Amino acid sequence: MHQMMILLFFCVMSCVKVFAYVCNHSGYCEDGRIGIGAHYGNLASPISKASSTGGYISMYGGYYYKRLYGALDFIGGLTRPRFKTDSGIYRDNAAYFFASSALHLGASFGKDNAFLLYLVPRLEVYSFGEDDRLGKFAVAHFAIGPHIRNRFSLSEKLILEAELGAEANSRRYIGESFSDKKGFDGSYRLNASLGLYFKRGGEYSRKIDFYTKLGGVFYHNKAYVHSTSVLQPTTRDFALMLEVGMTLENLFRL
């Protein structure tokens, strides 16, 4: 699973140079961004509550052709978990991997592709460390659902970006080597983000632009039996992310 996420990471990375937010008279535009962020998560394991803090890198490459829209985004990083169990609270000294990669397929509307309506298939993986009974505890979600995004010009140099989405879990994996899985069962996630895009460059400028974004995810996961003796209860979890980065509209302009 980690090998798959690393492959997606380099796939997006290879697209970043191509996907800069540049339009031509043929009706297509390209948008590329790269950033770093801080992550806080509150997720439950079968035997404990786990909160985690960490950091990540983010990459996004989008393509617009007339009314068609497609994109690939990726975030990946490391978190340090803190566990709360019946016997007390302890912090793991090791850092663990998490990643999320999504494909965007949809349509753009309005001037300058201001409004987007699209479908998102997503793969997300969290690793939480070791447990004496369960081995390495990890979860992976395959989810799919609709998203909307809108851009509002606040001034000539400042743009507000807002996004909302809902995704149903088509498949959930849990535990060591993802040996236990669950299909559609009513589990879902809600995504929201609000960001500011600071435009510094003009049509002939080589100045790069910057953005900042606050995002959140709410997870509603239904219960299921993880093993013969451990029940994964219904959980309502969340994650928060604060991200800053740059766009590549002018960086690679010839």
Image (cartoon, grey):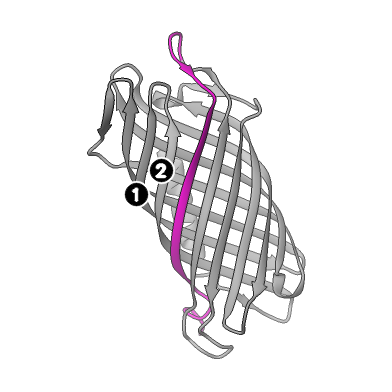
- The residue closer to the viewer here, 49 or 170, is 49
In this picture, is 142 found above or below 61?
above
In this picture, is 31 found above or below 252?
above
As for residue 104 lying within the magenta part, the answer is no
- Where does residue 90 sit, x and y in percent of width and height? 25, 32
For numbered disc 2, what is the local secondary structure? strand
Mark number, residue 54 = 1
> What residue is shown with label 2?
98
Q: Residue at x 41, y 26 (%)?
A: 177
Quick check: marks 2 and 1 in contact, CB under 8 Å? yes
Q: Residues within 10 Å of mark 1 (few under 14, many from 20)?
A: some
Q: Residue at x 47, y 84 (%)?
A: 207
Q: Quadrant of the N terminus?
A: top left
Q: Which residues are magenta?
A: 227-254
Q: Residues within 10 Å of mark 2 (few under 14, many from 20)?
A: many
Residue type pointed to by label 2: Phe
Query: Relative to residue 191, is residue 68 drawn left or right?
Result: right
Residue type pointed to by label 1: Gly
- Where does residue 108 sit, x and y in percent of width and height? 74, 64
- The residue closer to the viewer here, 15 or 116, is 116
Q: In the rendered image, which quarter is residue 150 located in?
A: bottom right
